[in-house]
């Protein structure tokens, strides 16, 4: 849109963007300012926009008030484990889909796409029964397996797209030099596919880090909760410690927003070619 | 390779792709397919309050659900929720995507800002908004009061309808980024010479928008819309955090309703029936999506 026939559409559009940014940033502004308010100011009537006294000690107190460190550690274990498992299962599947011809390929692809329809929450009744049978309610391993499975479709789709975009000539040359298929995959294809693999890694990590519903349902002991469920400790029945809740939320949010910003460009490229959504 | 080993190798060759797929099939089979089967089975079973399966009871659970007024209200809410959230976030996301595709000062910052709601956990967004709209000490009342827009504090969630409207608002806000980035991705593939040709023809701003840009964006928009329908339909944390389906179970969607049935009211069989009804509605959407994706794949090849 290079020509300037009338300036008004442009002005209106920029105004729109400005308003959107304000609305998007507003909750983050509230989160930061509220996290630094004192308990008295929290519930004072009249309200305040900024804390009258910036109570930075809230950011230290949370680590004593609740096992926040343990929650974050659990989130890292669940998200890290799920990412590793989803990629470890996704790479061979994506490789087969991009390099081999076989019966049932279309059916498998269809099943992968269909699996995106089933969010964990509609399956919770079944998931709970399965996990009870496997003695994995209240277990981080259970969360790892479930998160890996529900991110499998996306991982396969994005990895397959990456592999398909790379010519198989180099692998064939490596095979002539005496490499086996597995060696050719690890030594030749994977290094070249690094950007696509890293994007997939980070995206699966973020999805698992932000997962709430499965963990809420399955995990009952406090010390096994990931951070998304753990923040509920500040959320009593009639007395909510908002300042601690938000201070903790900041620690839970910053790492994933930074990671997301790193992959944003690559993700845009892969978006519409396959099903991608958190 | 030895001569006599050949038939066996051939056989292995044919099996090889399945070996590569095996880890993935096992993972999804156990963790997704088994729960699906279990939900269907449970929906036709009588489950006691303590979780004991008392066996097949036909369509009793379904009848209970259909005779329940809350279910029909929930179904209506789900339709409204899905259409409003997907519809408005798509329109706003398109506009935002179009503007972000232009070159202007601060574009990179705006792009980064738009990523925020997408990267943040839904539960955290929901909790913040629950705080913002609180009638007694919420941030929105404080803000509007200080700005002089309101004279006294407003109860933003006086009726179930208002509660639900806020939930839709939060849903729209967190869904916009995905649409925006799909639009940006689609715009990158549009040939700029088309715009030059439109200029030669003396096309206005609106002509370019409705006759060039939007038609060419349709493939990206279809993907984002179908995926959003699935994800918004299944979205749980916003409603569960802000209203828990209350007051009086008036603000449920199917997923919060089935969660409450199953894990608060211990009506597991009935909850499974609601799940199945949800699947059937979504299955229609997902099959449309699958057919379109596979067709797009074929065109690429």
Image (tube, coloured by chain):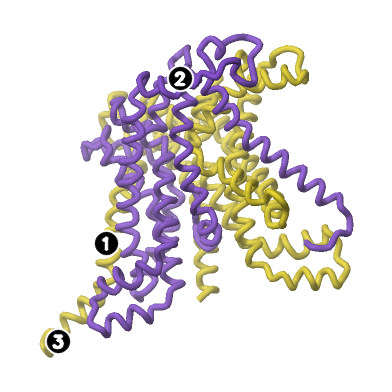
Q: Tell me where residue B290 appears, x and y as whole percent.
A: 50, 60
Q: How far is mark 3 from mark 2, CA to CA?
A: 72 Å
Whether residue B248 is visible to the viewer of this picture, yes or no, is no
Element type at marker 3? loop
From the image, tell me which residue sits under label 1.
B22
B25 to the left or right of B270: left
Vertical position of residue B18 compared to residue A58: above or below: below
Element type at marker 2? loop
B202 to the left or right of A232: right
Q: Which chain is purple?
A: A
Q: Which chain is yellow?
A: B
Residue plotted at (44% across, 62% down): A195
Depth check, front residue: B297 or B173:
B173
Q: Tell me where residue B82 appears, x and y as whole percent.
A: 59, 41
Q: Quadrant of residue B275?
A: top left
Q: Quadrant of the N terminus of chain A?
A: bottom right
From the image, tell me which residue sits under label 3.
B1
| Circle 1 crowding by C-alpha within 10 Å: few under 14, some 14–19, many from 20 | some
């Amino acid at each position: 849109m290079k020509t300037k026939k009338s300036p008004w559409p442009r002005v209106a559009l920029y105004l729109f963007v400005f308003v959107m940014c304000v609305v998007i940033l507003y909750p983050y502004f509230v989160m930061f300012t509220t996290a630094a308010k004192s308990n008295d100011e929290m519930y004072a009537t009249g309200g305040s926009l900024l804390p009258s006294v910036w109570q930075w000690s809230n950011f230290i107190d949370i680590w004593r008030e609740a096992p926040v460190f343990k929650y974050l550690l659990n989130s890292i274990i669940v998200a890290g484990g799920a990412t590793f498992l989803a990629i470890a299962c996704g790479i061979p599947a994506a490789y087969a889909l991009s390099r081999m011809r076989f019966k049932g390929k279309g059916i498998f692809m269809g099943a992968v796409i269909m699996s995106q329809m089933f969010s964990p929450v509609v399956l919770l009744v079944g998931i709970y029964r399965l996990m009870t049978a496997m003695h994995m309610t209240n277990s981080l391993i259970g969360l790892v397996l479930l998160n890996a499975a529900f991110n499998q479709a996306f991982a396969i789709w994005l990895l397959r797209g990456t592999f398909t975009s790379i010519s198989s000539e180099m692998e064939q040359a490596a095979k002539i030099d005496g490499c086996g298929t597995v060696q050719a995959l690890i030594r030749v294809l994977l290094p070249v596919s690094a950007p696509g693999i890293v994007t997939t890694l980070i995206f699966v990590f973020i999805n698992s880090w932000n997962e709430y519903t499965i963990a809420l349902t399955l995990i009952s002991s406090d010390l096994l909760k990931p951070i998304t469920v753990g923040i509920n400790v500040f959320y009593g029945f009639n007395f909510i410690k908002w300042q601690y809740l938000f201070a903790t939320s900041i620690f839970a949010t910053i790492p994933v927003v930074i990671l997301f910003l790193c992959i944003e460009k690559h993700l845009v490229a892969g978006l519409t070619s396959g099903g991608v959504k958190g | 390779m030895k001569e006599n080993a050949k038939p066996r190798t051939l056989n292995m060759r044919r099996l090889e792709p399945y070996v590569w797929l095996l880890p993935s099939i096992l993972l999804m089979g156990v963790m997704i397919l088994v729960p699906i089967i279990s939900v269907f089975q449970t929906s036709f079973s009588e489950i006691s309050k303590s979780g004991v399966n008392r066996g097949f009871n036909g369509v009793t659970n379904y009848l209970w659900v259909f005779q329940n007024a809350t279910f029909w209200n929930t179904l209506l809410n789900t339709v409204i929720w899905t259409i409003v959230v997907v519809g408005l976030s798509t329109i706003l996301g398109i506009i935002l995507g179009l503007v972000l595709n232009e070159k202007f000062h601060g574009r990179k910052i705006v792009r980064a800002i738009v990523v925020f709601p997408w990267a943040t956990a839904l539960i955290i967004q929901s909790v913040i908004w629950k705080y913002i709209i609180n009638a007694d000490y919420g941030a929105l009342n404080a803000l509007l009061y200080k700005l002089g827009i309101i004279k006294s504090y407003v109860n933003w969630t006086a009726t179930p309808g208002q509660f639900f409207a806020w939930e839709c608002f939060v849903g729209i806000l967190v869904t916009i980024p995905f649409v925006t980035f799909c639009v940006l991705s689609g715009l990158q593939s549009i040939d700029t010479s088309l715009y030059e040709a439109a200029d030669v023809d003396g096309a206005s701003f609106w002509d370019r928008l409705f006759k060039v840009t939007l038609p060419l964006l349709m493939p990206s928009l279809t993907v984002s819309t179908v995926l959003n329908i699935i994800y918004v339909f299944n979205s749980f944390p916003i409603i569960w955090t802000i209203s828990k389906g209350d007051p009086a179970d008036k603000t449920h969607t199917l997923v919060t309703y089935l969660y409450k049935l199953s894990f608060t009211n211990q009506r597991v069989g009935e909850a499974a029936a609601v799940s199945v009804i949800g699947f059937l509605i979504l299955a229609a959407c997902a099959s449309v999506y699958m057919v379109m994706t596979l067709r797009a794949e074929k065109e690429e090849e």
